Image: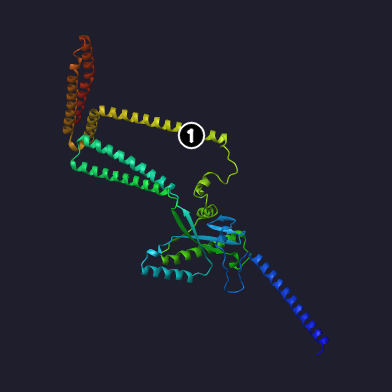
């Protein structure tokens, strides 16, 4: 083979190789562009709905922090294209368990993994223990216990000084007083130890969460509106969360679904790890962090509130005054009735005898009525005799006038009695 033919052959081979290289480069760029478009359209998530089994890729746990809003115990992401529900789990101390307990926990966790039919993410959050609220609650309780203790001491001392209680009763009261005093001292020790513990900044608490996602593509129908998708997502996520809680309970792990407020607290701590120790979510809400400006209440509203309070105060005063007047009127009637009780008793006894005259007989009824009249006269004489010593210091003229008045007052009564006796005798005849 001559040199010219060899050169032609090498040139042809080189051109073929260059052509193949160009084709490979074009194919590479085409595949790369296609994968990039697919990645952008799926939102960094490869999910195949054409096959019966879904393929999931490992993603960062911090993806759940990118949220649009928190609503209906769910974190909504990507404008309603992803819904999350979070289950808070209570950890177990695996190292302190016995061999059988460890085996039971492992088997329960394997059962949990085998029953999963959807992706989950496990998130651990470390928080500094804030004991201010606990200390405030303890102090409030201790104030109540101290007040009860002071009252019991006063009651016990009063009972001891009175001397009207037996030794057994006093011992029982002293036992109750000692119990209350011990409870008060125990509460003070708890507050002291808790405050001393709160000064240590290394007191940490770990919280464990299982994050469960849901995608609207799983429903297989794209004709739902946002509210319907939200309702479907909530139902599906709630079912999945309950299934996770039930399977984790086999490991001795208790779980609960986080509500909207707890989800906000979780995200707040995740975004503000340095500030959450000083300025927590509850303080942020109380400070009105979501308000652009603050305004004073309306003057008319304040005046209306003052008028309502004034009306309520005057109504209470009027009601109390009326109740006092009614009680005084009732008390006056009771006193009048007590003062004339003997006369009322005699009159009622006479009426009872008159009603039963046909049963007891006219003679017996007349005799009984006469005896009642005699008792009445005797009572009147006794009253007059009791009143005579009080009148000794008066003038004679006054005594004469009062005696004349008394004679004038008693005379019609005696005539009336004689007339009644005559009428009863005529009726008997």
Residue 27 lies left or right of residue 174; in this view the side is: right
Query: x%, y% of residue 345?
Result: 23, 31
Q: Nearer the viewer, residue 23 or 338?
A: 23
Decide which of 113, 328 is in the foreground and name it.
Answer: 113
**Residue 95 in picture, x, y percent from top left:** 39, 64
* Residue identifier under label 1: 309
Q: Say which residue appears at 55% left-offset and 54% top-offset.
A: 271
Task: Mark yes or no: residue 429 visible.
Answer: no
Above or below: residue 13 compared with residue 252: below
Could you tell me how many numbered marks the image carries? 1
193 relative to 341 in the view: left or right: right
**How is this picture coloured?**
rainbow
Q: Nearer the viewer, residue 182 or 171?
A: 182
Residue located 57% across and 65% down the image: 59
Determine the residue located farthest toward the bottom in the rendered image: 1
Where, quadrant-wise, is the N terminus in this rendering? Answer: bottom right
Q: Residue at (17%, 35%) from the top-left corner?
A: 361
> Where is residue 13 shown, x and y percent of the image?
77, 83
The answer to whether residue 5 is seen in the rendering is yes
Category of crowding for the residue at label 1, using alpha-carbon neighbours closer than 10 angstroms: few (below 14), some (14–19), many (at least 20) = few
**Residue 362 occupies quadrant:** top left
Extreme front residue here?
Answer: 3
The quadrant the C terminus occupies is top left
**Secondary element at image label 1:** helix
Asked whether 376 or 329 is in front, the reply is: 329
Which percent across, then down, holds residue 245? 46, 64
């Amino acid at each position: 083979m001559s040199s010219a033919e060899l050169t032609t052959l090498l040139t042809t081979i080189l051109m073929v190789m260059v052509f193949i290289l160009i084709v490979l480069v074009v194919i590479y760029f085409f595949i790369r562009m296609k994968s990039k478009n697919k990645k952008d359209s799926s939102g960094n998530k490869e999910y195949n709905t054409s096959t019966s089994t879904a393929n999931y890729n490992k993603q960062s746990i911090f993806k759940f922090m990118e949220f649009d809003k928190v609503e209906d115990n769910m974190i909504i992401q990507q404008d309603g294209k992803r819904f999350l529900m979070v289950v808070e789990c209570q950890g177990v101390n695996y190292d302190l368990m016995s061999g059988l307990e460890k085996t039971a926990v492992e088997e329960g966790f394997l059962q949990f993994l085998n029953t999963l039919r959807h992706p989950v993410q496990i998130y651990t959050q470390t928080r500094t223990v804030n004991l201010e609220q606990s200390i405030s609650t303890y102090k409030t309780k201790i104030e109540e216990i101290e007040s009860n203790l002071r009252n019991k001491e006063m009651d016990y001392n009063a009972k001891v000084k009175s001397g009207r209680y037996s030794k057994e009763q006093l011992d029982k009261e002293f036992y109750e007083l000692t119990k209350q005093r011990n409870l008060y001292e125990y509460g003070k020790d708890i507050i002291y130890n808790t405050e001393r513990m709160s000064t240590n900044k290394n007191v940490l608490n770990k919280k464990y969460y299982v994050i469960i996602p849901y995608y609207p593509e799983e429903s297989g129908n794209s004709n739902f509106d946002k509210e319907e998708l939200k309702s479907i997502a909530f139902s599906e996520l709630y079912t999945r969360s309950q299934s996770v809680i039930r399977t984790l309970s086999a490991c001795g792990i208790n779980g609960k679904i986080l509500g909207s407020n707890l989800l906000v607290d979780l995200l707040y701590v995740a975004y503000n790890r340095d500030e959450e120790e000083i300025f927590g979510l509850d303080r942020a809400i109380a400070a009105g962090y979501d308000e652009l400006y603050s305004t004073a209440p309306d003057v008319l509203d304040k005046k209306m509130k003052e008028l309502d309070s004034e009306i309520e105060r005057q109504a209470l005063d009027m009601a109390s005054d009326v109740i006092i007047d009614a009680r005084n009127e009732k008390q006056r009637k009771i006193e009048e009735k007590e003062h004339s009780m003997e006369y009322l008793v005699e009159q009622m006894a006479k009426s009872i005898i008159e009603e039963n005259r046909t049963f007891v007989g006219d003679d017996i009824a007349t005799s009984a009525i006469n005896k009642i009249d005699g008792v009445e006269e005797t009572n009147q004489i006794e009253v007059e005799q009791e009143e005579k010593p009080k009148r000794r210091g008066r003038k004679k003229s006054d005594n004469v006038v009062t005696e004349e008045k008394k004679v004038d007052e008693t005379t019609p009564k005696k005539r009336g009695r004689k007339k009644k006796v005559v009428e009863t005798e005529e009726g008997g005849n």
